[in-house]
Image: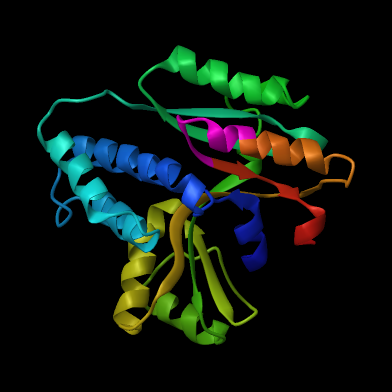
Amino acid sequence: MGRAFEVRKNAMAKTAGQKTKVYSKYGKEIYVCAKNGGADPDTNLSLRRLMEKAKKDQVPSHVIEKAIDKAAGGAGEDFQPMRYEGFGPGNCMVIVDCLSDNANRTITEVRNCFTKTNAKLGAQGAVSHMFDHQAVFQFEGDDEDAILEVLMEADVDVTDVEVEDGKVTVYAPHTEFYQVKTALTEAYPDITFIADEMSWMPQTETEISEEDMPMFEKFMDMLNDCDDVQDVYHNAITPSSN
């Protein structure tokens, strides 16, 4: 499942052409998080996590600071989280998470991604019941038993711990995110997380055929091009990830 985590979540490309999209994505998330939970990362743990993640993805400090200052000032847009679900090319299951200040614009853009790729937008809850909302941590290592012992001693509820290709992947209920991170960082002060985030992990997989791949890639590209789309989760296993 460790490798599957990397291929099932459609990470935004960090190429030069996608930097603006990445900065915008984090700017919105940080703004909403600071506006709802406070602009002090010492008391707003969700904000601290987002700031650390943004820095890891090479988002400039001024982008982060601008979003926090904007939230602290009390002005600005009123972004709302929106989630869309459906079936993508090859009948894979898809969850699309958005942040938007215009619901009509967002649903129009997301629906367009589905209709132009012969995909089907479903009702709320259409596929999310087939995903588990998980805290996921990935870091270098090869001792599964030692990691599991650390987490058990910290009385953390863990779903799974896996080792593959020199990487440890820890899965836990999303409510255990901070408990897991605290336990790991206290036990291993020099730990560097390759991933530390909340993700929707599919309970089943759908293999995408070579014939469906061009449409699947077009579908993902179109979603990535939508300014309001923050994250895309799917259960597709593509020929390149097998």
Query: Eyeballing the image, is 229 above or below 60?
Result: above
- Is residue 123 visible to the viewer in this orientation of the structure? no
Residue sitting at x 21%, y 50%: 62
Residue sitting at x 55%, y 63%: 159
Q: Nearer the viewer, residue 203 or 31?
A: 31
Residue lying farthest front?
16
What span is colored magenta in the figure?
A: 222-231
Would you say 126 lies left or right of 169 here?
Answer: right
Query: Eyeballing the image, is 72 above or below 60?
Result: above
Residue 96 x, y percent position in the rendering:
56, 34
- The question of residue 225 being in magenta is answered with yes
Would you say 86 lies left or right of 61 here?
Answer: right
- Is residue 16 visible to the viewer in this orientation of the structure? yes
Q: Nearer the viewer, residue 219 or 154?
A: 219
Quadrant hosting residue 219: top right
Residue 84 x, y percent position in the rendering:
56, 27
Residue 56 x, y percent position in the rendering:
37, 63
Query: Eyeballing the image, is 38 above or below 43?
Result: above
Q: Nearer the viewer, residue 239 or 147?
A: 239
Residue sitting at x 63%, y 38%: 221
- The question of residue 126 being in magenta is answered with no
Q: Is the N terminus in the top left, top right, bottom left or bottom right quadrant?
A: bottom right
Q: Is the C terminus in the top left, top right, bottom left or bottom right quadrant?
A: bottom right
